[in-house]
Image (tube, grey):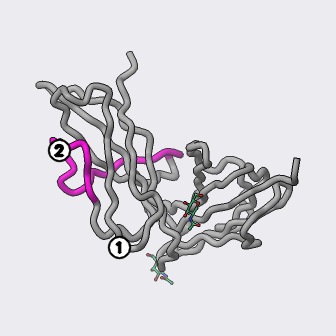
């Protein structure tokens, strides 16, 4: 049987460094005594997925919202809910991201060429910098579709080439093997006039 899956929202999704971020976890029947669990998504390059790290005081809160103070970097979050004794748990929500455009010393992503707007036929390379041996690129499209970047070709070291640029705005970021998320960049693609 399929477990219900809560829907997580984060606000704001683009961060001014040091701002507070509010997470909301929505379950289908909110009145019925749920408690909530709050996690940070930590990339796991070997598993090609993510693992979850419980946030401080994020275990079994009565509130369906959780506030993170002083957030500075790109991060992904996940929630789930539980109720009853023994406790029944919902599935984990889809991860939601808070993006920071700020480059920090540990992990940074640069785009070349760095243009306001690209054409679908352009080729764009992404370079992840930082003292990490392993990287993965992830992306999030305007339509809300999240994926690890399987349409990227790994060039050398930590450079990637994107083959097929999607029309619209897509957010890209890098994830290191130790769970660092780089700054995020918007890549905006507009076709020729139709
Ligand atoms: C990179 O990381 C390694 C292992 O943690 C460390 O020994 C080395 O000093 C670091 N290099 C730089 C330039 O930070
Ligand atoms: C990226 O695009 C989104 C949606 O269009 C926008 O809200 C956000 O401010 C942009 N961020 C940056 C750093 O350009």
Percent position (x, y) of residue 103?
A: 52, 76
Choose top left, top right, bottom left or bottom right for residue 22.
bottom left
Q: Residues within 10 Å of mark 2 (few under 14, many from 20)?
A: some
Q: Which numbered dot is residue 18?
A: 1
Earlier-in-chain disc, 1 versus 2? 1
> Is 175 displayed left or right of 193 in the figure?
left
Where's the N terminus, which quadrant? top left
Q: Any atom of ligand 2 within 8 Å of the CB at mark 1?
A: no
Q: Viewer-proximal residue, 10 or 60?
A: 10
Choose top left, top right, bottom left or bottom right for residue 135.
bottom right
Q: Which residues are magenta?
A: 47-67
At horizontal 64% and vertical 67% (from top left) the residue drawn is 158
Where disc 2 sits, the SS reads strand
- Residue 163 lies in magenta, yes or no? no
At horizontal 48% and vertical 77% (from top left) the residue drawn is 104
Q: Which numbered dot is residue 93?
A: none
Q: Is residue 62 above or below residue 125?
A: above
> Is 140 displayed left or right of 96 in the figure?
right
Percent position (x, y) of residue 93?
A: 39, 38
> Is 86 displayed left or right of 139 in the figure?
left
Alpha carbons under labels 1 and 2: distance apart: 24 Å
Percent position (x, y) of residue 68?
A: 28, 61
At horizontal 58% and vertical 74% (from top left) the residue drawn is 129
- Residue 50 lies in magenta, yes or no? yes
Q: Is residue 102 above or below residue 148?
A: below
Please name the residue that numbered disc 2 is placed on.
61
């Amino acid at each position: 049987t399929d477990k219900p899956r809560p829907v997580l929202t984060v606000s704001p999704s683009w961060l001014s460094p040091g701002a507070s971020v509010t997470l909301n976890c929505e379950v289908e029947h909110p009145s019925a005594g749920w408690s909530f669990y709050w996690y940070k998504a930590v990339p796991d390059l070997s598993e090609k997925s993510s693992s979850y790290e419980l946030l401080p005081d994020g275990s079994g809160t009565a509130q369906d919202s959780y506030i993170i103070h002083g957030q500075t970097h790109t991060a992904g979050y996940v929630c789930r809910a539980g109720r009853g004794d023994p406790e029944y748990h919902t599935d984990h929500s889809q991860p939601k991201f808070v993006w920071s455009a700020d480059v920090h010393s540990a992990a940074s992503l640069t785009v070349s060429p760095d243009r306001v707007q690209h054409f679908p036929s352009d080729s764009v390379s992404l370079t992840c910098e930082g003292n990490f041996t392993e990287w993965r690129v992830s992306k999030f499209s305007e339509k809300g579709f999240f994926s690890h970047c399987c349409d990227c070709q790994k060039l050398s070291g930590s450079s990637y080439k994107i083959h097929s640029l999607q029309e619209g705005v897509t957010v890209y970021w890098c994830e290191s093997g130790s769970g660092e998320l780089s700054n995020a960049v918007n890549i905006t693609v507009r076709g020729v006039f139709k």
